Image (cartoon, rainbow, N blue to C red):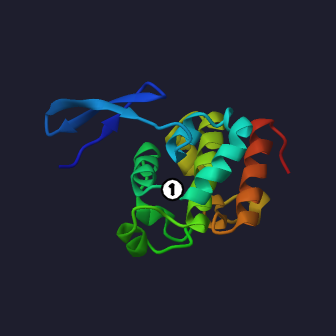
Amino acid sequence: MSGKIQSSSPVKKEATIRIGATKKRIAPVRHPKFSPSWVVIHSKETPGFKLELIDRIREGVKKSDWKQLIQYTNSTEKEFEHILPASISSMQKKTVYGKETSERIYQLAKLFGLGYEIFDSKDDFKKWLRTPSKALGNKMPFDLLDSSFGFELVQNEMIRIQYNVYS
């Protein structure tokens, strides 16, 4: 069953799946507090919850929370394959991810939250991630996300865009 999911409310997402010519309503999507998808939605609120996020990273991100983040960002696991420290096949075997993988998932969540705040749409943000940037040495921002330094560079560039400060 393939379909496009449309949503509107930031916390409880009501989704509509288009199957062929008909639409079918499915239950609202809940984003558990402090889950990676919650962090995307509440990116401005997360600085006050950093200690909670550190605890969540130490406990490990649940596979279901990772899948929900992928769905919320309209992405696929394959897109994040080079960014995550674990292979997709090993992640599919686990129910809770290790500390390093969990930290990277939360970094992605915070980055996407900032991106959704700065850019007009999810698609515009994803397009920017896949477009070479002069400020980043003509590299695509997405290609730099495999290290913490890369995350920092991309995040700093996004903040410059937000405040119209070009390098």
Q: Is residue 44 left or right of residue 85?
A: right
Percent x, y for residue 48?
73, 36
Q: Which residue is mark 1?
A: 61
Residue 3 image-quadrant placement = top left
The foreground one among 59 and 29 is 59
Q: Is residue 112 left or right of residue 139?
A: left
Looking at the image, the residue that sits furthest to the top is: 9
Looking at the image, the residue that sits furthest to the left is: 21
Percent x, y for residue 82?
54, 71
For the point 63% across and 34% down, the residue is: 117
Within 10 Å of disc 1 (Cα), the crowding (few <14, some 14-19, many 20+) is: many
For the point 42% across and 66% down, the residue is: 78
Residue 44 image-quadrant placement = top right
In the image, is residue 9 above or below residue 73? above
Q: Amino acid at mark 1?
A: Val
Percent x, y for residue 100?
61, 67
Percent x, y for residue 161?
75, 42
The image shows a total of numbered marks equal to 1
In the image, is residue 59 above or below residue 90? above
For the point 66% across and 41% down, the residue is: 114
Q: Is residue 130 visible?
A: no
In the image, is residue 101 above or below residue 9? below
Q: Is residue 147 visible?
A: yes
For the point 77% across and 43% down, the residue is: 159
Q: Secondary structure at mark 1?
A: loop
The foreground one among 119 and 97 is 97
Q: Is residue 5 left or right of residue 141?
A: left
